[in-house]
Amino acid sequence: MAGALVTTNILQTAVAMGLQALRERIVLARIANREREGDIIGARKNATVNIMVPASIAAADVVPDVVPAAVTAVTPTTVSLTLDKWKYAPFVMDDKGIQQVQRGVVPAQLTEAAKAIVNAIELDLWSLLNGASGFFGYSGVAATTPFGTGLSEYTDAKVQAELQLMPSDPERRFVVLDPYAHGNALNTNQITNASWRGDADAFRNGEIGHVLGATWVQSQHVPQHTAGTAAGATTDATGYAAGLKTITLASAGTGSILVGDVILFAGDSQTYVVTAGDASVAGGGTVSFEPGLKVAITTATTAITLKQTHRHNLLMHGDAVAFAMAPLMEDTQVEGMVRPQAVAVDNDSGLALRLKVTEQHYQVQWALDALWGKAMVRREFGVRIAG
């Protein structure tokens, strides 16, 4: 049976159908930057590519002289993207399912397998955004679904994005909302009017589309960040210069500060995301964060405020995150036996899936699999819209 499947090209047709189902449901992987995908050598797990993050350059005065002025050294940083996730979704397709493929109908089990791959990819990308690598920009009110009375949470996030120098390219800015926030946004007059003027078809389909300088999309996977319980936390009396990224807590207050939490220091309006140092406030300890301190902390103890547990909606630019999917090997023959499998790559999105057939004891197992990796590149290119 497996050999017949290969000769009738059902495998290639089926994997293309699975790819279509994948493309229709994926959100973050379509937003993320995919430009470095071609630099990965070898479609194998743990293949790696380094992504350059340019360093800032200051303009200098032109001073005519006999010899050129010395060039100030500029050292870009790099971020490593590794294909560290390889997942598969097995299922059994009966004769009816095979006949559906031949007629161009997507079998239900094939759709469910593609959905399993989508869920794995989306949750993996959200884990990147909701932890130590997450965004420090913050707007909205914790535990309050945004857009209940208008779009102020978005405009606040947009202001924060400008302050963080997020690229202004409106085609690469995205608002990613959970269903509740998305529902509230659909009820606002600003969205309704803008959608009818700009993209009536999207609004008729229950989508928001491109509004107010960003494309608004919905994701059922938007996570809730469960914050620590710190109250009365302060820094110690050491004092910290602007730019530093680690402080020591005084043994004061109660509760904890956790990785992924958003914190503020008294006298500084900048929000920071905790990158390391889960700490009991009463026990002191160190906490690391991004970005570096915008305002120096004096030698006096300084109060630390913690943003409470919140839903992690986003305003983000696609270049904030890098994502790569690698097409896996197609049919191979070992000692005269063919392993039937087919690969499809979507030309528009670069998404890649493989469908493999394994003959077992009086049954045939089908399985979709995918290999991917992700990396946070520019965390300043994102703002949380808390809910």
Image: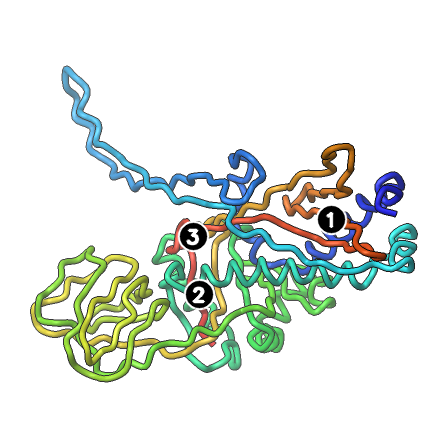
* Residue at the spot 44% in from the left edge and 76% down from the top edge: 310
User: What's the residue type where badge 1 is placed?
Assistant: Leu
Instruction: Residue under label 1, please give it.
Output: 355
Q: Type of residue at label 2?
A: Asn
Question: In the image, what residue occupies the spot 13% across and 58% down?
Answer: 241
**Comes first in the chain, label 1 or label 3:** 1
The residue to which callout 3 is attached is: 376
Q: Please name the residue that numbered disc 2 is placed on.
A: 130
- Can you give x and y, in whole percent of width and height, for residue 246 in the image? 21, 61
Label 2 vs label 1, nearer the camera: 1
Which SS class for mark 2? loop
- Name the side, left or right, on which 220 lies relative to 108: left
Q: Residue at x 40, y 64 (%)?
A: 131
Q: Does residue 325 appear in this view?
A: yes
Q: Is residue 146 above or below residue 213?
A: below
Where residue 62 appears, x then y in whole percent?
20, 28
Name which quarter of the figure residue 58 lies in: top left
Residue 41, above or below 385? above
Find the distance from the CA under tag 1 to the CA under tag 3.
Answer: 29 Å
Report the side of 342 relative to 172 (left or right). right
